[in-house]
Amino acid sequence: MADFAKRHSGVLLLALFVALLPLALPNRFYFDVATKVWLNAIVCVGLNLLVGYAGQISLGHAGFFALGAYASAILTRRFELNAFVAMGLGAAGTGLLAFAVARPILRLKGHYLAMATLGLGIIIFIVINREIWLTGGPDGTRVPALALGEWRLTRIEDWYWAAGAILVAAVALAQNLIGSGVGRALRALNGSEVAASTLGIDTARYKAMAFVVSAVFASLAGSLFAHVERFVTPAEAGFLRSIEFVTMVVLGGMASNFGAVVGAALLTMLPQLVADFQDYKHLVFGAVLMATMIFLPKGLVPSLTDLVRRRLGR
């Protein structure tokens, strides 16, 4: 019971924060920014399972995000499927693709693995960009409102609550996963793949599992993003989008689900704070990533947590 309370106290605090934040949001613009924070955080919570806990790098997760977005756009607009069915099919298809490529890609290590995942993301970007008859090509495509019967989710305030609830559920799921035998295997894998293998852990299986779960998280967030924006372009599959997701995870703190949420919040709001320097947004992202790796190698949340513990210990 104590372990359960410790594991989920953060989830309850996150739910409370999501519930109370609207009291401080003065207009629809801030609701829109907060909604994008929740959606990016869903991607980062999944990516953190792969990068932070399993110790595997991915520079192509924007491709999975875009696959979910385009699956919802195409299946709802062209084939008139229910939005929730389209979202489920998009997540399932993305998960199958991730499973198909996981074993060969995750045999690689270091910069070879980074290049392989980058190549996967580039392939997805090229396909989306070139298949104009299906995706709309560089011009993008419109996305219908998310609907269930006569009910339509169009107000950004409603999307705030929907995205926030899904984020809380995603963090709770990730916390449960990390507290299980799977989480212990992932941490062992991150510590030393050779040692984990010696202990009888099927490293290939757990790496593939983390890769698939993180891809499904990204796909679901992409589907939600498409319905929020009501429009999607190939830029969502771009390399720089993948770099943004990785930077969010590293900044917030690898191997910290709540760090992933904090990193997503900071870097989603950053463009709004430096709107006058929008052309240098990715330069700022790079500077933030470098500064984090130099001065806070564990990321913000783990570093601040350690600092508080040391202070209390004194």
Image (cartoon, rainbow, N blue to C red):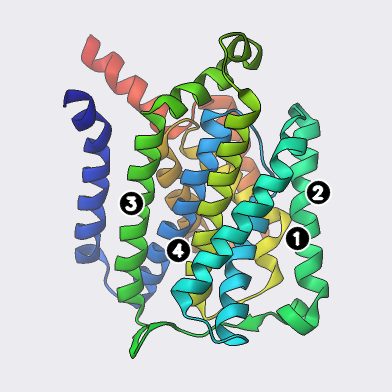
- Which residue was labeled with disc 1? 124
Which amino acid lies under the numbered mark 3 shown in the image of this protein? Answer: Ala
Which of marks 4 and 3 precedes in the sequence?
4
Quarter of the image with the C terminus is: top left
State the residue at coordinates (33%, 67%): 162
Instruction: Give the distance between the C-alpha atoms of the residues marked 3 and 2, in whole angstroms.
Output: 31 Å
* Label disc, if present, on residue 169 of the rendered structure: 3
Choose top left, top right, bottom left or bottom right for residue 116: top right
Which of marks 3 and 1 precedes in the sequence?
1
CB atoms of marks 1 and 2 within 8 Å: no
Up-down relation of residue 114 to residue 70 (above or below): above
Which of marks 2 and 3 precedes in the sequence?
2
Eye-nearest disc, 3 or 4: 3
Q: Could you tell me which secondary element the residue under label 1 belongs to?
A: helix
Near mark 1 (Cα within 10 A), the count class, few <14, some 14-19 or many ≥20, is some
- Which residue was labeled with disc 4? 36
Q: Nearer the viewer, residue 17 or 95?
A: 95
Q: Is residue 134 left or right of residue 288?
A: right
Near mark 2 (Cα within 10 A), the count class, few <14, some 14-19 or many ≥20, is some
